Amino acid sequence: MTTTTEPGPGQTRGLVCAHHHLYSALARGMPPPPNVPHTFIEVLENIWWRLDRALDLDMLEWSAKLAALEALEAGCTAIIDHHESPNAIEGSLTVIAAACAEVGVRVSTCYGITDRHGAEGAARGLAENDRYLSEGGRGLVGVHAAFTCTDDSLAAAAELASKHRVGVHIHVAEGPDDIGAADRLRDLATDDWLLIHGVHLPDDHGLQGTIVHNPRSNMNNSVGYAAPTRFANPVALGTDGIGADMLAEFRLAYVRHREHDLDATPDAAWSWLETGWDVFPEARNDRVTWSYEPIEPWHLAFTPTIRAVDVEADGRLLLQNGTPTRVDADEIRAKAREQATRLHTTLESLV
Ligand SMILES: [Zn+2]
C-alpha cells in the first residue's frame, strides 16, 4: 500500500541510510591494529579487512540486529547494506535480511565481491549475490571497489545485476588508490548503480548512478571532501557503517559543506537525505514522529538533540515512545556484547 499523504507536524517519512555496513556494528572497542595506519590503504588493510576476515555468521547475526535496532531508534527504517565476510560468505545475506526483519527495519543488502582473496573468492561472492537475489531477497549486486577487482569480475558483477534487474553497489574513488575507477566502470555503470564516496572522482567522471556521500566516514579516514554538489548525478547520504543516525549524518553533511563553502545552506544536505526515498521508495510509506518540531532543515541542522519517538512502517508500529515493539533492546545489546567479545578475541589472534 502506498501512502500518499504528507507526514504530519513533527513527522518525516522513514529515513534511509543509503550506504551501511551492518557487519561493522561490533567493531567499536575493537583491539588496536598491529600496525598504526598512515594511509587510507593501510586503514583498510589493518582495520576493515582484518575485521571482515574475523566474522562468522553468529557474529554477523548480532551485529546486524544491533545495527538495525540502532537504526530504528534513530528513525531510519530502510538500510542499503554492503556486506563482506570472506570466511563466512554462503548464507550471509540471508542472515542479514532475517536480522533486520526481526527488528522490523527494511534492508537491501549485497555481497561486495573482490579479487583480494583470489578468483575463487570473487566467484563465491558473486554466487552469494545470485543465490540471495534468486530466492527473492531485496538487494543489489555488490562489488568492493574497482581497485580490488579484475576487469572480468567487474563485468561479471554488472552482468549478474542486469540479469536480476538491479543495480551494482560499489565503492568508487574513496581514496587515491582507486583513482582509475571511472575509466574502468564508465561502460558498465547504469543509472540504478550506487556509487559510494566519489571523493577522488573528477567532476565530469561520466558514470551513471547515484553518488552516496558519507561525510563522517570520509573525515574519519582522512580521504578528503567529496564536494558532492559538483556532480551532475543524484546524491544520497550514507554512514559507511558508522551507525544509521541519518539526522546526525545530515547535520555533519551540512556543516562539512559549509566549511567548504560559506554560501552552503542546510537545504543541500536535506536534499541528499531526500534522495534516499528515490533509492529505497518503500520508506516513503513509513512515518517517524520526532521529539521536536518544526521539521525543517534550518531547525534540524542546529538542534542536535532530536529523538525518534514513534516509528511506523506500512502502518505497523515498530517504535513506541522510543522503545522497540518487536524485539527486546536489552537482550539484543547483551547478545551483541557477547559476540563482540568473541570477535575482538579473534581479531587479536589474526596477523
Ligand atoms: Zn562502505
Image (cartoon, rainbow, N blue to C red):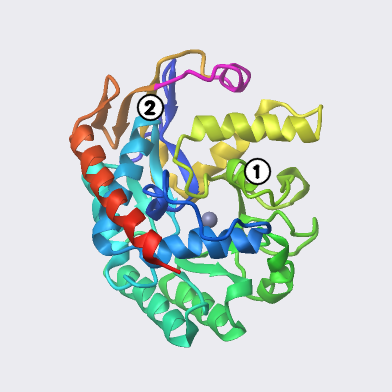
Rendered view: 312 above or below 177: above
Q: Which mark is residue 11?
A: none
Coordinates of residue 350 in the picture (x, y in percent): 41, 67
Residue 83 appears in the figure: no
The N terminus is located in which quarter?
Answer: top left
Q: Residue furthest top?
A: 293
Q: Nearer the viewer, mark 1 or mark 2?
A: 1
Give the residue type that dot 1 points to: Met
Question: Residue at label 1?
Answer: 219
Coordinates of residue 208 in the picture (x, y in percent): 66, 62
Q: Residue at x 55, y 65 (%)?
A: 45
Cα distance in 3D space between marks 1 and 2: 28 Å
Residue 121 is covered by the magenta coloring: no
Question: Residue at label 2?
Answer: 288
Is 18 or 32 nearer to us in this picture? 32
Coordinates of residue 115 in the picture (x, y in percent): 52, 80
Q: Residue at x 71, y 68 (%)?
A: 182
Q: Which residues are magenta?
A: 296-307
Q: Residue at x 38, y 80 (%)?
A: 124
Rendered view: 42 above or below 314: below
Secondary structure beneath label 2: strand
Q: Residue at x 43, y 81 (%)?
A: 121
Q: Is residue 229 left or right of residue 196?
A: right
